[in-house]
Image: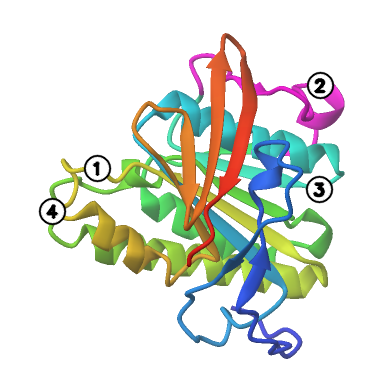
């Protein structure tokens, strides 16, 4: 990629959560990161969140809400997905809605293969700064890889590394903090031990939230967020944090 200013190495071990762009959480949440100590991962210019879960409606709704929330803040959002929504997913009550002034800041990129995503990310090297996105949203990363592939963890890690490095690169060019949100399904049909794979993926993103089955529960470390989906709306119910003894 093109040369840009030197990275400011701050080695951030703790980050404020990005979950507030999905749900109106008014509790101050911070998480310990487990990123590999690479040059770009130690930069303070970017931040990332991975959402893992089986329920596609929930994942689609929460990731689409991310786009709407950031667009409402005036950020340019690029949503990468394999195909268009058959219908727009539910959005979160109390957060920005699908208004024209929000949608105008969202660009949808439909990539049929991961190679298409790679080409898009590489093309950002030639983009004028004012056309670069502030937020990258990748919905359904698992759809780009064969679920029975024994190297699935390797491909996921490689993809997250590329997405993360690109986000950090864009942030330095724009001289502002840029964000990355990714969703994926990792179940027993995909890998032998989903828990071990999730732990491994924490090396590439700042925070990982897991949707537990169809229970409308998000979990990250000792924090649980309960919500419910009613028709076109997602409602926040409770936020609990169990402190370790």
Q: Choose the circle earlier in sequence order: 4 or 3.
A: 3
Which disc, if any, is residue 192?
4
Task: Residue under label 1, please give it.
Answer: 187
Q: Are marks 3 and 2 in contact (CB under 8 Å)?
A: no
Q: Choose the circle earlier in sequence order: 2 or 4.
A: 2
Mark 3 closeness class: few <14, some 14–19, many ≥20 residues within 10 Å:
some
Q: Secondary structure at mark 2?
A: loop
Examine the rendered structure and indicate whether residue 64 appears above or below residue 219.
above
Q: Can residue 125 be seen from the camera position used here? A: no
Mark 1 closeness class: few <14, some 14–19, many ≥20 residues within 10 Å:
some
Quadrant of res 39: bottom right
Mark 4–mark 3 distance (CA, rounded to whole Å): 39 Å
Task: Residue under label 2, please give it.
Answer: 99
Q: Choose the circle earlier in sequence order: 4 or 1.
A: 1
Numbered range of the magenta stretch: 85-107
Q: Choose the circle earlier in sequence order: 1 or 2.
A: 2
Mark 2–mark 4 distance (CA, rounded to whole Å): 43 Å
Which disc, if any, is residue 146?
none
- Between 208 and 78, which is closer to the camera in this rendering? 208
The nearer-to-camera label among 3 and 1 is: 1
Q: Position of residue 177 (x, y in %)?
A: 77, 66
Mark 1–mark 2 distance (CA, rounded to whole Å): 35 Å
Mark 3–mark 1 distance (CA, rounded to whole Å): 33 Å
Task: Residue under label 3, please give it.
Answer: 75
Q: Secondary structure at mark 4?
A: loop
Q: Main secondary structure of the magenta part?
A: loop
């Amino acid at each position: 990629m093109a040369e840009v200013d030197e990275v400011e190495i701050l080695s951030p071990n703790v980050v404020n959560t990005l979950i507030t762009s999905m749900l109106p959480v008014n509790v101050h949440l911070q998480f310990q990161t487990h990123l590999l100590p690479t040059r770009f991962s130690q930069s303070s210019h970017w931040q990332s969140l991975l959402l893992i879960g089986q329920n596609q409606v929930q994942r689609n709704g929460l990731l689409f809400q991310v786009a709407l929330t950031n667009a409402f803040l005036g950020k340019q959002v690029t949503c990468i997905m394999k195909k268009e929504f058959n219908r727009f997913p539910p959005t979160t009550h109390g957060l920005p809605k699908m208004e024209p002034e929000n949608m105008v800041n969202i660009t949808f990129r439909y990539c049929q293969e991961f190679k298409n995503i790679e080409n898009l990310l590489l093309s950002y090297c030639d983009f004028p700064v004012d056309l670069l996105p502030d937020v990258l949203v990748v919905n359904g990363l698992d759809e780009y890889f064969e679920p029975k592939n024994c190297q699935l963890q390797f491909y996921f890690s490689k993809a997250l590394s590329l997405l993360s490095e690109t986000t950090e690169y864009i942030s330095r060019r724009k001289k502002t903090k840029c964000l990355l949100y990714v969703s994926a399904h990792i179940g027993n049909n995909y890998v032998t031990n989903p828990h071990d794979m999730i732990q491994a993926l924490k090396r590439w993103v700042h925070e990982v939230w897991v949707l537990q089955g169809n229970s409308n529960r998000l979990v990250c470390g000792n924090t649980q967020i309960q919500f419910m989906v009613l028709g076109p709306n997602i409602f926040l119910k409770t936020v609990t944090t169990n402190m370790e003894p």
